[in-house]
Amino acid sequence: MARRYLKFGIEDTFGDGYSSGEDTSMPMTSVSLEIDRQPLYEESIETYNPINVFGGGLSVSGSVEGTLRPRSMVDILEALCGKREDVGDNAVFTLDYPKSLEFNIGEKVINESTETKLVGVIASELNITAESGEIVTFTLDYIAKEPSQTSFDNSFEVEKTRPVVFYGASVQIDNGGGYQNLKVQSFNTTLNRSIDDDYYVLDSATLDGIQLDGHAEFNGELTFTEREFEEMKRMIYGDDVNTFPANNDLQVSKLKFVGKDVDGDDCIEIEFPAAVWISGERTISGQDPVEKTLSFRLVENDADEFKITVYDVNATEGGEE
């Protein structure tokens, strides 16, 4: 029996919740929930303090953090990306208009047990971090339409799938000759859908739906080993042969993050078909290893599209369906 939990699932219609039995779960490191009533204060020339206060647009937001378990995160990835296509035992996610989720946050304490139900949950930003010597982790930031109190699920049991750790993670690059592994010590990517968190309309104090507020910002940062020079040169000079910025060109490469689970089975691939090197930093300190970091951002590519593939989505913790 779980003392605390998070259940989640895709909504068919924004704010209506998911159908019974269509939720999933996974172990979480932390779950946060912030409620801001955004009060409206009526001021008057007669007094030093406001004379009235009213509830404003209800703001519901938070984040969830945990170990990267892609097979448990297919609903989150579908909500963030917007489109899911099942190809055999695999799920492929590409960009479309985002979808909404329902969250159920359970908490059991000595004197009381409760569950907070959030409907109209919008996955606004997903961050994935892989560092050498560590478990691969994720953080999801969200906003939601509204909360309500429901009954704690005493029968809840967390669903476990195999996680990704650093020795199963790799970053590959293709500069025209096919994908090759990069020698990196860390990889961090942020997938931000630029969601409007202030989308209120007349006759309602809650969010009215999902509205985009700009282009998606999919970017990342890599920390290279001391011996890696080629990508730093491409960032500075536009390619790996020039010794000065040629025509102010930027290097555009294909990048791929590959994650295998702890059993060594393919688990997730994130493909950036047009990653532009936008900045870099090199630090030399004493006789410490030289630190090299490069940042990139995804731009549109006519030939290929950004996509996330989760392999063998029905595999359980033991590796069986």
Image: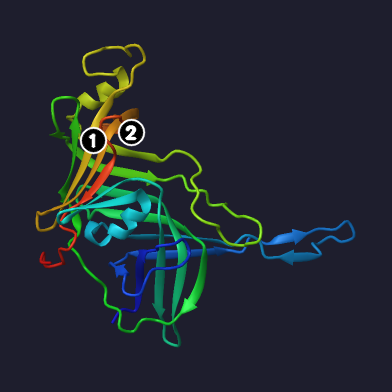
Which of 284/217 is in front?
217
**Is residue 225 placed above or below 207 in the rendered structure?**
above
> Where residue 278 sits: x, y (%)?
36, 28
Marks 2,1: beta carbons within 8 A: yes
> Where residue 273 sits: x, y (%)?
26, 34
> From the image, which quarter does the N terminus lie in?
bottom left
> For numbered disc 1, what is the local secondary structure?
strand
**Residue drawn at 36 percent across, 67 percent down:** 8
**Residue drawn at 36 percent across, 70 percent down:** 6
Here the colouring is rainbow
Q: Quadrant of residue 104?
A: bottom left
Q: CA distance from mark 2 to mark 1?
A: 10 Å
**Residue drawn at 23 percent across, 32 percent down:** 254
Q: Residues within 10 Å of mark 2 (few under 14, many from 20)?
A: many
> Where residue 159 sits: x, y (%)?
24, 70
Q: Which mark is residue 255?
A: 1
Residue at mark 2: 296
Q: Amino acid at mark 2?
A: Phe
